[in-house]
Amino acid sequence: MEFAKNMYELHKKVSPNELILGWYATGHDITEHSVLIHEYYSREAPNPIHLTVDTSLQNGRMSIKAYISTLMGVPGRTMGVMFTPLTVRYAYYDTERIGVDLIMKTCFSSNRVIGLSSDLQQVGGASARIQDALSTVLQYAEDVLSGKVSADNTVGRFLMSLVNQVPKIVPDDFETMLNSNINDLLMVTYLANLTQSQIALNEKLVNL
């Protein structure tokens, strides 16, 4: 606990506006040590959050759970602590999602090594996923019309909302816009590679 306190004091010197919201631990469940650690952070933050990250993959996935503590017992007597689970929602940036997806692909590699995909490969992969999703939606619609599957009003309203959000663009205009964006992307990639080559050449000339 003294180590955590010293590290927090050092962190406040660098980022004085940041506050402690809680603490996290690796594991799939609450342990007997969680109460002691949570008691310490209860003095540093009001109603701190305890986050558990299951790195052992007990259920085949890295589950993340959150808890807050609630006092229980008879008033005036020895009080206990009960951890109440919270609803966890994942929020991330697009760049973080790309990194996580890339790490997950190593599960299917024999040597656990995988390289970065080019921009065009990523566009192709995204297009393939969209095509698969459209095929699934089309098959569901055909099954409903043929009577194989009973209609679901919730799904129907969701699909209608999804269709209404698609911009109405003439196919020729869309193709022109797409080709223009691809050309811009290729130009940026070319300039980036050219700049990288120039920097590498400059470093070699300086070291001569």
Image (cartoon, grey):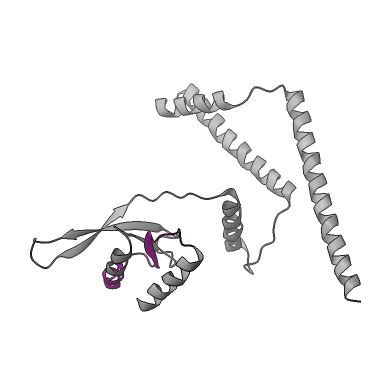
Q: Would residue 26 be counted in the magenta stretch?
A: yes
Task: From the top left corner, tell me how far across and down residue 206 is, in percent.
Answer: 89, 72
Q: Nearer the viewer, residue 77 or 58?
A: 77
Instruction: State the image quarter where residue 25 is shown.
Output: bottom left
Left or right? Give the position of 156 relative to 124.
Answer: left
Which stretch did the figure color magenta?
Answer: 16-38
Is residue 204 in view from this perspective?
yes
Task: From the top left corner, tell me how far across and down residue 22 is, in percent.
Answer: 36, 61
Task: From the top left corner, tell me how far across and down residue 24 is, in percent.
Answer: 39, 64
Q: Nearer the viewer, residue 165 or 10?
A: 10
Q: Nearer the viewer, residue 140 or 124?
A: 124
For image coordinates 77% across by 44% down, the residue present is 185
For image coordinates 41% across by 58% down, the residue present is 64
On-image quarter of the N terminus: bottom left
Task: From the top left corner, tell me how far across and down residue 141 is, in percent.
Answer: 51, 26
Give the answer, above or below, for where 151 lies relative to 32: above
Q: Nearer the viewer, residue 32 or 117?
A: 32
For image coordinates 66% across by 63% down, the residue present is 114
Q: Would residue 92 be counted in the magenta stretch?
A: no
Number of marks in picture: 0
For image coordinates 82% across by 60% down, the residue present is 196
Left or right? Give the position of 101 relative to 153.
Answer: right
Left or right? Give the position of 55 relative to 69.
Answer: right
Give the answer, above or below, for where 205 lies relative to 127: below
On-image quarter of the C terminus: bottom right
Is residue 152 in view from this perspective?
no
Left or right? Give the position of 1 relative to 167.
Answer: left
